[in-house]
Image: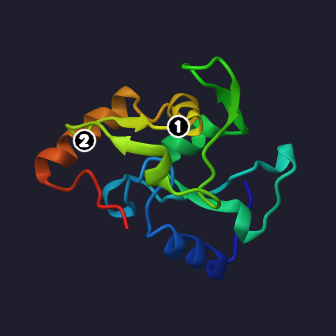
Amino acid sequence: MTNFSAITRQRVEQRANNRCEYCLSPQDLVMGRLQIDHVRPIVKGGANEEDNLCLACELCNQHKWTKIDGVDPLTGQVEPLFNPRQQKWAEHFTWSPDGLYIVGLTAWGRVTVIALKLNNDLAVTVRRYWVQAGWHPPRLS
């Protein structure tokens, strides 16, 4: 695990609006500190530079691990994962009408939903409570 300076962490958190850049879970609603993730993992040629860092919840970070791509269920083609440094979330994902599920709109979005298990049982259960409380889905800026 890489230790980042307080300044780097603060800049990554601010840029991410203090929420996971994959599932959009906000820091104040998740149990545990959001983690700094390498968009392109070090073992796959990534660097510790800020343009390769994003904020991720523990669930997303654990599922992503060293993945950089996956198979699109619609085309069967290998496609890269969503890159929060280069792409906008709303162009690749949307929320299901009930706010419980992240829906991939593009090949990159679909691959990321599957690879990071963005709709795993725990995430959907927690989102259900967040929806009931009026905290979810988040507004996109």
Kind of residue at badge 1:
Thr
Point out which mark residue 78 bears: none
- In the displayed structure, 95 sits above or below 121; it is below
On the picture, is 19 further left or further right than 36?
left
Q: Determine the secondary structure under disc 2.
A: loop
Q: Position of residue 77 (x, y in %)?
A: 69, 22
Q: Secondary structure at mark 1?
A: loop
* Residue in the image at 39% along x and 62% along y: 27
Point out the image quarter for the C terminus. Answer: bottom left
Residue receiving disc 1? 106
**What kind of residue is marked 2?**
Gly
Q: Earlier in the sequence, mark 2 or mark 1?
A: 2
Crowd around label 2: few <14 · some 14–19 · many ≥20 (10 Å): some
Relative to 117, is 65 above or below? below
Q: In the image, is 14 to the left or to the right of 29?
A: right
**Is there a contact, CB below 8 Å, between mark 2 and mark 1?**
no
**Residue, disc 2:** 99
Could you say which is closer to the camera, residue 5 or residue 40? Answer: 40
Image coords of residue 136 (percent x, y):
23, 52
